[in-house]
Image (cartoon, rainbow, N blue to C red):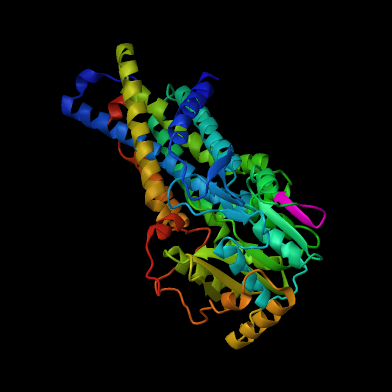
Amino acid sequence: MPKKIMIWAVCVSAFPLVSLRAEPEDWGRLIHRKDSLYNTIFVYQRGPIVTLRFGRRGGVPIQSQVHLDELHRHMLDYTKMTFCGLLYQPRPQRMLVLGLGGGVIPRQMRDFFPEAQIDVVEIDEAIVPIAKRYFAFADDETLKVHIEDGRVFIKKQLRLEKPPQYDFIVLDAFNGDYIPFHLMTREFLREVRGVLAEGGVVVANVFYTNRLFDAELATFLDVFGPCHVYMSRDSGNAMLVSQAEDEPMPEVEALIERARDLQETHRFSFNLITVAKCIRPTLRPEKNANVLTDDRAPVNYLRQQERNVD
Amino acid sequence: MKYDSSIETDGRRRLRRAGVIFVACVCGWFVMQLEILGVRMLAPHFGSAVYVVTGSVIGTFLLSLSVGYMLGGWRSAQRQSRRNLGLNIAAAGLWMGLLPWMTEPVCDRVFDLGLDEKWGSLLAALILFAVPTVLLGTVSPTVVRWLTTCSADSGWNAGMVLAASTVASFAGCVVTAFYLILYSMRLTLWVSGGALMLLGAGLALLPSVWRKQDA
């Protein structure tokens, strides 16, 4: 018992050291702060723009951002990039999103596909009320948030008598500092494939600025066969996109044509054609990139290695 | 187990002391190495929730070490403690080498029991890691017993052994988390298990340099 008290005392006394430092100005005022089991969650607001971050060290990417007056606007590059999955599966009925954050991706998908059944899996319980209160996220009968480790969730689904078959899966469980290696390995992606419906698509949000990218791409190629990469020009984000079948991926022209159709139908707040044009169909991982496995996944090491961005 | 220091030369005594502390250090190293790899071994099955890491894995190791300390202390007074300890270490090494084959079936079965990630991961951690950790936990008290010739020395010897093996644990932590993690976990476990088996067999089988004490 006294040991426990001591640990608490140390944690509490370290707290002012952190909070006395000046607030980063770009995001405005700190309006909420929460120490959860997994993160120190910071919510900033500047006018109508609300920003979500985990930790406040420089270099940690923003998790989520919304413009409260224009909820359809994608403030961050990667949320609109995930829409590239629609080029392969234009009418998703059953979606799975690993990682909630501010809930921008499921909320937007919900707006365009009101009929779709969406499951969101988030490990950190404390994020959910924050997403609801500050980021205009709402769950209901057809948009459910499950508090669980993403891999455990999928494993449980696979053990059901009739595992759900998702036709649109977004892997977005990687926050800035902590990398859950077990959500990147060959074994994990095989489990993902187990809950992927025929004609379904998997979209993974990754960073292409370090060598972990090559390993992730190599792992996707290993598990899914073909994989398309979409590289953002404005941020370090890239999307890895693969389909359920081992079929060849659609041609680039066909994808851009489809982007045109979808843009016409849905009138997205961003231009899906621009996103489609970020495709890098010939991109291959560096020669010595290893497939990540449960046995060997040096994710932190690879992330520290800079990658030559071509 | 009676040990008469007067028939041993000083140099030989120092060598013996160093050797004995080395054994404690090797075991301290491998306990922590296994603990860190244990977190990685469970993550694919039970996730990396805080419960798995801090509760199940660390808890299992602490509990197993206590049991090991107790057993080791109790058995250290018995005859042939050197052979027994050697066998303990070798058995821990064997278990460690077998872990790569045990992890999946054990975790799958435990997962099927329908326990949540807290109790499920705790049960799996106990099944997988308790045995080698208990066995390695018997080393320190036994080694303290070997080094102690009179009660006045006992505190110093215990302190020395604990300090040395804990420093080795620290090194095992850092080296595993910083460097060995870059390599195949299976390979690390096989090499480590092999090393422990060699050490244990050596300790149990080598013609005694300290026969006088064992006789």
**In this picture, which residue range is highlighted in magenta?**
A139-146
Residue A236 image point, x, y percent: 47, 65
| In this rendering, position of residue A110 left or right of residue B45 | right
| In this rendering, position of residue A184 left or right of residue A133 | left
Residue A134 or residue A280, whichever sits in front: A134
Residue B66 image point, x, y percent: 51, 27
Answer whether residue A228 is visible to the viewer in this image. Answer: yes
Does the magenta segment cover residue A182?
A: no
Residue A263 or residue B210, whichever sits in front: A263
Image quadrant in which the C terminus of chain B is located? top left
Count of marks overlaid on the render? 0
As displayed, is residue A61 above or below residue B170? below
* Outermost front residue: A47
Q: What residue lies at 72% left-to-right and 54% top-to-bottom?
A: A156
Residue B205 image point, x, y percent: 36, 40
Q: Quadrant of residue B60?
A: top right
* Outermost top residue: B152
Q: Quadrant of residue A76?
A: bottom right
Residue A100 image point, x, y percent: 65, 53
Residue B41 or residue B76, whichever sits in front: B41
Residue A35 or residue B8, whichever sits in front: A35
Q: What residue lies at 70% left-to-right and 59% top-to-bottom?
A: A106
As displayed, is residue A260 above or below residue A30? below
Does the magenta segment cover residue A140?
A: yes
Answer whether residue A225 is visible to the viewer in this image. Answer: no
Q: What residue lies at 51% left-to-right and 51% top-to-bottom?
A: B98
Image quadrant in which the N terminus of chain B is located? top left
| In this rendering, position of residue B156 left or right of residue A156 | left
| In this rendering, position of residue A233 left or right of residue A128 | left
